[in-house]
Structure formats: C-alpha cells, structure tokens
Image (cartoon, rainbow, N blue to C red):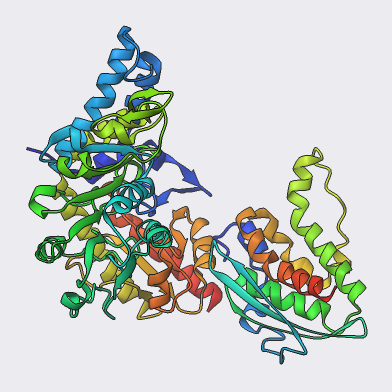
C-alpha cells in the first residue's frame, strides 16, 4: 500500500479490515423477546439488522446480520463489541461520542477550524474509524449501524 | 467522410487534463455522465456571452438569435436520429427521466386503461419503471417484465405469451449495467404485430451507436444530453408527429399555451406544448454542438473504437484475475457496448471504488438505478467501468492496476 495515499491507509486501518474479515457478534436473536431493527442505506444498498436483548437497563446481548462495504460492516462489528454488556446510559454515551467523531468535520468548518474535543481514549478501538471523516461520502456507511441501534433503543421507550 | 482519432478526441476534452492524487485522471464513468469537449463548452459560453435572451417572446435581435439557436438544436437532434417529421417531432425536456414521465403521464394516461399492459424488461433503469408504477396506481394498468437470461440477455423465449394485452413495449436500447445491446428491430416488429407501440430508452445507446428511428421502426425514443458529450439539464423525447399531436399537455404554464383566458386555456401545438416555462436554451445550444461533434467523429467509428476497447478490457480482466473479478454482463463483444460491470470477489463495490479513486480512476459503484436487475443476479451493487469515444486502452491499464491493489488489500 506504499503507493497509495496516507488517507486511504487512514480509512482502511488494520483494525477495520480485521473487523470486516471477522465480524464480531454476527447472528440473530429470537425476536421477541429481543428487539429487531432494520437499517438501510438506499443510496448504496447497504443493509443491517440489529437484535438487542435488554434486561434491567443493561444491553445484555447484541447480534447483527446484513451486508455492506468494509466501513459499514466493520463499524457495526466495532459498535457491537463496544456496547455489548453495557448499561444503557453508557451505551448512549458511547453513541453520542461516536456521532461526535463522525461530525467533527462539519463542526470544524462551522467553528473556524476549532474542532470540538472528542475523547478518543473513551472510544477505544472505535477511534480507528476516525479516518472516515476524510471521506465525507463514507460517513453514512460508518453511521448506518449506529443509527439503527439508536432506533432500537428508541423503541424501548 | 469522417475521421476518428481517440487521442485527438481526448485532447478536445479539458477535464481529461486533470491530475488526481498525482495521477492523470482515468475517466471510466461515461455511462453515468460523459465528459464535454471544448466545442460544447465554448458554444455554451459564446451563447451566454453574446446571444442570451429568452426564446419565443421578444422581437429584438438577440432574442431572435436565441430562438433560432434553440430551434436549430431541435433540427440537429431530428437529423441525428433521422426523425421522419423533422424538428416538429423533437421535444426538449430536463433529462431522460422527465421524458419517461412525459411518456407515462401524457401518452400513457390518455391511451392506457385498467388492465392494459406496459411491458418493460428486468434490465430497465428506474426511470423506465417507476413512472409506470405511478400510472398503475392511478389507472390500474399492468406493468410486466421481460426476464433476463443467465448470460445477461433478454429472455425472449416466452415473448408471444408476454405480449398478450400489451399496448406499449418500453425497453432500453442498451443496459446501463450489463452493456447488453437489445434487438430493437426485432422487438419493434413483434410489438407492432401485436398492435402495440414501442418506446426505446436511448440514454446509453445514442452516443455509442448510430440511431435511426425510421430504420429501427420505433414509436418513441428517449435520451439525455449529458450522456452524449452534451450538457446536463436537457433531455429529448421523440415520437411521430401523429402521436405527438394527440398527446395532452404535461406540465402547465407559460410557453406551452396558445391562449389563456379566465375560463380556461388552449394548449400550443407541436413540441412547445410540452415545454412549459423558459426552456434550457444554453443547454440546447450545447446539445447542438455535441451532435455536430459526434457527427464529426462518425457514429460507426465510435462503435468500432468502443467495441475494440470493450473486447480488450474483457479479455485482460479475465486473464489478469482468473475469475476473482467477475464481469456482470456478456463476456464477448457481440451485441454489447463498452459498459463493464464488475463483481470483485469478497470486496464490496464501495471499497473497490474507494481504492480506485486513489489511482485517479473514476468508476461508479452502486445499483445503477436498476435494482430489479441487481436482485435478479443477487447483487447489492457492482463496480461499473464505462467507456466513451475519448477512452483509450491505457485507461484499462490503470483500471487493472488499481483493481489488483484492491484485491490484494482486502484479500
């Protein structure tokens, strides 16, 4: 990959390719009792189904099926690993931080180059997805599973 | 006599001088939109610099010039497709999609009733599907599909059966995904035997093969300017004069009327009846220049050049990747254009296109507005490389180099 731009290296980091090749938490959960939500990206045909098993305010289990590009699929896999077994308020916090990471570019433009601080350490492996913001058309790929998760959590209320 | 030299064509296209990520641009997205030669860009600039005025209204000099330029473009288009009734049969629209909406919402709404069948094919662009579904909601017509064979051709084995009750066969001249060129002559004869009319989607074909509506014996032809080296914002709808004269107006407003009173209106006659509001004048000027440019190259020369490029690309892709990169479309150049859809094993089309972008290669990943066809072949998307008269075999060199990198990266 030495002949390619560093931007591309940023986008396709090893962690991302790893999660793409060996996605975590792949599969289905019986629904009900699990919540089942579908997400589509009509522009590129990516689709995802997220299954959520919530008990006593904790996301006990999460499974996913679907197909799509390496960015959408690895983002889904990274997301599942980050939120599985966590209390819902912590899940929501992670979602908020990730969404912030994905909107940094817009915010940077809006605030004369002063980017809001995103706590990359709090994101752990998810920080590998920050290269996506250099490719604005791919942000929708990265956020598909997250928006689907949000939709699922909304159904709880 | 026309002469053709792809390198000279290339030098006429300013965008092909672009450098992307330190590499010269490799433009392989002509099926999505073609690039424009200076002849087109200059004609539009000159129009805006010297002659811009609204058409069909004022009496001053530049207004007459603008009107003459606009109507002159209609004549050029009529000549280009050999419209038997001349310029009076050529309607300018916004794009091919609007032309299909004109066909469905004017001709279709007037002539089709519940139970009548519109026969399309599985390989149609959404523009030749959705307007028929919309008409179905209003009038209860049936929309029927000609299936596709496993080798990416129309399955005409049950055509006689499929033709029962058909009032209109609406079909693409060339698939924007597969590159398949359909046997329009044969289909026109069959449609007419069954008392049906035939409409042809020429969006992918008019810039890549000679189109003669009389020789093809078709009833409607639809295409767009920006896929034939012309500008965006202008499309064409052609039908025979007798059919056009019986079609009710489509969009209402200025320009399309003969008279407006407080108790109603009388529509204008001829193509202007379907051209409400200020039309795309500069775009018509650009389209005229594109037609002249294509005529100068010679359509049969373009066919020969692009067929050679397609044959070369198909052979080399098969050799280089040994099945790892699958062509979704006919594997040889028989009845096939230079639109080559690829399925790279284990690599999503968006990832392929992203890697290709780093090599300056412009291709289109996605469903190409042909989702029924994608479903037929169990694909969410493909990567499509499509060539034009300005393409060279070296574009395929870069494509293959970039594809090899994508395969390695995700392998």
Relative to A79, is B233 above or below? above
Q: Quadrant of residue A92?
A: bottom right
Which residue lies at the image location 16% right of the left edge and 54% below the top edge? B304
Q: Quadrant of the N terminus of chain B?
A: top left
> Which percent across, then down, holds residue B332?
21, 71
Decide if residue B214 is on the left or right side of residue B198.
left
Q: Residue furthest top?
A: B60
> Which percent across, then down, holds residue B341?
36, 67
Q: In the rendered picture of this protein, how many numbered marks are placed on residues?
A: 0
Q: Residue furthest front?
A: B263
Decide if residue A128 is on the left or right side of residue A87.
left
Decide if residue B395 is on the left or right side of residue A122.
left
> Which percent across, then down, holds residue B198?
19, 57
Choose between A119 and B404: the one closer to the eye: A119
Can residue B296 be spotted in the picture?
no
Relative to B92, is B208 above or below? below
Choose between B283 and B194: the one closer to the eye: B194
Q: Quadrant of residue B320?
A: bottom left
Q: Residue furthest bottom?
A: A30
Can residue B54 be spotted in the picture?
yes
> Which percent across, then down, holds residue B399?
40, 61
Which residue lies at the image location 88% right of the left edge and 61% below the top edge? A119
Decide if residue B235 is on the left or right side of residue B379.
left
């Amino acid at each position: 990959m030495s002949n390619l731009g560093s931007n591309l290296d940023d986008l396709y980091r090893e962690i991302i390719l790893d999660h793409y090749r060996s996605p975590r938490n792949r599969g289905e959960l019986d629904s009900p009792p699990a919540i089942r939500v579908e997400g589509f990206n009509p522009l590129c045909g990516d689709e995802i189904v997220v299954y959520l098993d919530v008990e006593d305010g904790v996301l006990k289990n999460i499974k996913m099926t679907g197909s799509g590009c390496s960015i959408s699929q690895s983002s889904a896999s990274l997301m599942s690993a980050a939120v599985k077994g966590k209390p819902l308020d912590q899940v929501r916090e992670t979602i908020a931080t990730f969404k912030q990471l994905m909107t940094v570019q817009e915010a940077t433009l809006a605030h004369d180059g002063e980017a809001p601080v995103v706590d990359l350490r709090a994101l752990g492996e998810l920080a590998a997805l920050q290269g996506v913001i250099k490719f604005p058309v791919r942000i929708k790929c990265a956020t598909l599973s997250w928006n689907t998760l949000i939709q699922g959590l909304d159904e709880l209320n | 006599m026309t002469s053709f030299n792809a390198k000279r064509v290339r030098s006429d296209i300013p965008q092909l001088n672009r450098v992307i990520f330190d590499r010269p641009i490799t433009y392989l997205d002509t099926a999505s939109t073609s690039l424009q030669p200076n002849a087109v860009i200059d004609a539009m600039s000159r129009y805006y610099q010297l002659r811009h005025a609204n058409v069909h209204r004022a009496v001053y000099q530049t207004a007459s010039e603008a009107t003459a330029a606009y109507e002159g473009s209609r004549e050029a288009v009529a000549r280009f497709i050999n419209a038997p009734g001349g310029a009076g049969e050529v309607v300018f629209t916004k794009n091919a999609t609007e032309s299909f909406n004109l066909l469905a919402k004017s001709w279709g709404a007037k002539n089709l009733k519940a139970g009548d069948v519109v026969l399309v094919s599985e390989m149609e662009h959404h523009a030749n599907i959705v307007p028929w579904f919309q008409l179905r909601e209003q009038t209860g017509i049936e929309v029927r599909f000609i299936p596709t064979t496993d080798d990416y051709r129309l399955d005409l084995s049950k055509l006689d059966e499929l033709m029962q009750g058909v009032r209109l066969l609406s079909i693409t001249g060339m698939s924007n995904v597969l590159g398949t060129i359909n046997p329009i002559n044969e289909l026109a004869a069959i449609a007419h035997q069954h008392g049906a009319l035939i409409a042809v989607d020429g969006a992918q074909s008019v810039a890549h093969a000679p189109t003669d509506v009389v020789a093809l014996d078709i009833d409607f032809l639809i295409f767009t300017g920006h896929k034939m080296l012309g500008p965006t914002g202008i499309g064409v709808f052609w039908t025979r004069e007798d059919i056009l004269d019986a079609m009710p107006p489509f969009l209402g407003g200025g320009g399309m009327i003969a008279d407006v009173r407080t108790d109603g209106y009388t529509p204008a006659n001829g193509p202007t009846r379907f051209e409400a509001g200020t039309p795309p004048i500069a775009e018509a000027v650009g389209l005229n220049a594109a037609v002249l440019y294509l005529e100068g190259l010679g359509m049969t020369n373009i066919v020969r050049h692009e067929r050679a490029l397609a044959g070369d690309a198909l052979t080399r892709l098969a050799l280089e990747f040994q099945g790892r990169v699958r062509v979704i479309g006919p594997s040889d150049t028989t009845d096939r254009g230079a639109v080559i859809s690829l399925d790279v094993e284990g690599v999503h089309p968006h990832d392929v296109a992203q890697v290709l972008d780093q090599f300056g290669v412009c291709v289109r990943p996605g469903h190409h507005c042909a989702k029924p066809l994608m479903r037929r072949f169990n694909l969410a998307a493909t990567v499509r490389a499509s060539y034009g008269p300005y393409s060279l075999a070296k574009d395929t060199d870069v494509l293959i180099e970039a594809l090899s990198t994508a395969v390695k990266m995700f392998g």
